[in-house]
Structures are given as structure tokens and as C-alpha cells.
Image (cartoon, grey):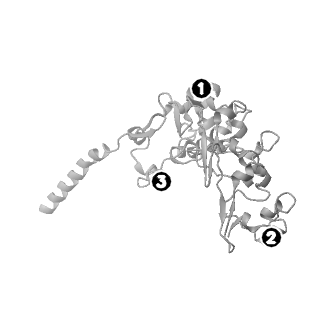
Amino acid sequence: MKFRFATLITLVLMFAALPAFAKETKDISFKLRNAEPVVFSHDYHLAKYNNNCRICHNALFNLKSRKSYTMAEMEKGKSCGACHTGMKAFSVADEAECNRCHKGKPRPVVYRTKGAGEAVFKHEVHLSKLGNKCRTCHANKAITGTRNTTMAQMEKGKSCGVCHDGKKAFTVAGNCGNCHKGMTPPKTVAFKVKGVAEALFSHDVHLSMFKCADCHTKLFQYKAGAKHFAMADMEKGKSCGACHNGKDAFASTGDCSKCHPGLKPAVITWKTSMGEAAFSHEIHLGMFKCADCHTKIFKYKKGSAPATMAQMETGKSCGACHNGKDAFSVKDDCVKCHKM
């Protein structure tokens, strides 16, 4: 008798706990960065499916992983899209039904870009042009499936570049002020070069003659600390040398001080078995230009391969000029170069 009574008490407690358990199935709010939250009602869906939780858990929604799904994934049957196909329930791909889940108006998306001001994407501007068809962007993974897309990637058709290609809409390769509001004029960029005065690039000077798209991103990435090129690379048309070729603009092999203001090349010394040899830039620049020696004879690089006296006598290195015709021969008075 006592056993039966205890069993009855246990059953009563179990059934009494069921309503309390049901109350745990509260609404779920999915927060979005640029719009009002999407609210999922457990009460509404459980009433539709006779309180059968297993229809969704864990077949569609794994309570452990808590993975978020994109609209493109839902349209392929993931998450809510397993039922919301247009047959069992309204389709997630039906643009007329977007406001069934997404309440309110989408907010502007602000992208903060270091050194280039904020770029603002306005939903209302784009939706009015697209006839309020959200799926134009949100069903296209190339547009909304990537984050922190660079300008170079956009130029190749990613993110905003899918439409802003110069055909459907203005190109991302120019018109910077269209997206980057309040952009301050880019500052002068200083390139520090070991052993030589820093090279200065003035955006103000170049923007008075060219557009941003003329250089970015074909020649230079929109990125601080992008790859730097050697003077020898510039002579081959890389970097600044694409324009500074002696035709479109003064050659990069010309007057160094145009880019390296305050340039004062030092005396270069070499330790040899015949005493220290010294080369004076000051003396030679009084008669020649930088381009006469660099980079046909000498690379713009510290520690370049030194030439032997025998090689100089055959026209290498200093021997290209010091041949007894253009200048005194390397075979002549050694003390002119060597402190013996």
C-alpha cells in the first residue's frame, strides 16, 4: 500500500511539472547587426505541430552547436528553410513575405576604414532602385557571404563590386567620395629607405592631375604597408615606374632629389687589401646625374657585389668610366681612390 501511494505521488509530481517545462519554450530573438531582431515563437510553432519538439530538435536545430544560417542557406533547405518552402509554410525566398519575420526598417551599414573615412551603405537607397527585392543581394553569396572585403577584391566582382562595375552602377575603382563620406584628402606618404633620405609621395600633387582609379588598385593596393618595390623594379615599370618612365612623367632613374628631398648621398668606403677605397657622391654628382650610374652600373642597394680591380680594368663597375678616356684609368695612380 505504501509503495502504491509513493508511486502515485511520483506520478502527480511528474505531471505537475509538465506545464512548468512547457513555459521554458519562450520566444527566441535572433539579433541582426543592421536590422531589428527576428523573433521565433515556440508557442506558435508548437501549436501547429501538437507540441512535438522533435520535428525541429535536433533534426533542424542542434541545441549544442547554435549555428547561424544565412538566407542563401535557408533557400537551400537549411534551418527555417526546411519547412518554409512555399508548400508547408510560406517560402523564405518569397520577397513579399520578408516582413513576416523581419520587422521594421533595415538600418544603414557603416564600414570604418582606417585613413579613408567611413563608407556607408544605405538600404533604403538600394531597395528603392531594386524594387524592394531584398534577395537581389541577400541570396547572392558573392555579395553578402563575405566580410571585410578589400577594394581589390571588389574590383574583381566581390561584395559591392558585383554591381558597382561601371556598367550596372558606378565603379568601385573610382568615385571614392561616393561611398567614403567626409574622406579627408590622403596625406603625403613617406617611404623610409635605408641609407638614403626618405622618399615622399604627395597625394595632393597627383590628385590634381589624376583620379584615384588611375593608380588604385592596378599599381598600388588600398592598404598601409603594401609591398614596396626597389628602384630596379621601377625601371621595369613597376610601382611609380609605371608613369615615371621618362615619357608620361620624369623617369624614376632621373633626378633622385625630386622624390628624395634633402638627399645627401654619403661617401661610400670599401675595405681592401690595398687600404680603404672611397667613392664620393658629392664629387661625381657635380659632373653627372644619378641615372648615369644607377642602375646600369650600380644597383640602388647596399652591399651589392663588389668588383675586383681586374674586372674594373675590363670595364666593370668604376672601370666603365675610369678607362683613361672618360676619366683617369683604374690602372693609374692608386692613391686617388685608396688611402694607402
Residue at disc 2, secondary structure:
helix
Vertical relation: 312 (above or below) 129: below
Instruction: Residue 315: give x, y in percent of width and height.
Output: 84, 65
Q: CA distance from mark 1 to mark 3?
A: 39 Å
User: What type is the residue that disc 1 sits on?
Assistant: Val
Instruction: Residue 250: give x, y in percent of width and height.
Output: 77, 41
| Of residues 179 and 126, the one drawn nearer to the viewer in this rendering | 179
- Residue bearing mark 2: 311
Q: CA distance from mark 1 to mark 2?
A: 70 Å
The C terminus lies in quadrant: bottom right
Examine the rendering and report whether any part of residue 234 can be seen: no
Structural crowding at the residue carrying mark 2, measured as other residues with C-alpha within 10 Å and reported as few (<14), some (14–19) or many (≥20): few
Of badges 1 and 3, nearer the viewer stands: 1
Instruction: Residue 156: give x, y in percent of width and height.
Output: 70, 44
- Residue bearing mark 3: 59
- Residue bearing mark 1: 125
The answer to whether 60 appears left or right of 158 in the picture is: left
Instruction: Residue 192: give x, y in percent of width and height.
Output: 60, 49
Specify which label sits upstream in the sequence, 2 or 3. 3
Specify which label sits upstream in the sequence, 1 or 3. 3
Q: CA distance from mark 2 to mark 3?
A: 80 Å
Q: Which mark is residue 67?
A: none
The residue furthest left is 2
Residue at disc 1, secondary structure:
helix
| Of residues 94 and 236, the one drawn nearer to the viewer in this rendering | 236
The N terminus lies in quadrant: bottom left
User: What type is the residue that disc 2 sits on?
Assistant: Gln
Q: Identify the residue at horizontal 28%, vertical 44% (top origin).
A: 19
User: What type is the residue that disc 3 sits on?
Assistant: Ala
Structural crowding at the residue carrying mark 3, measured as other residues with C-alpha within 10 Å and reported as few (<14), some (14–19) or many (≥20): few
| Of residues 269 and 252, the one drawn nearer to the viewer in this rendering | 269
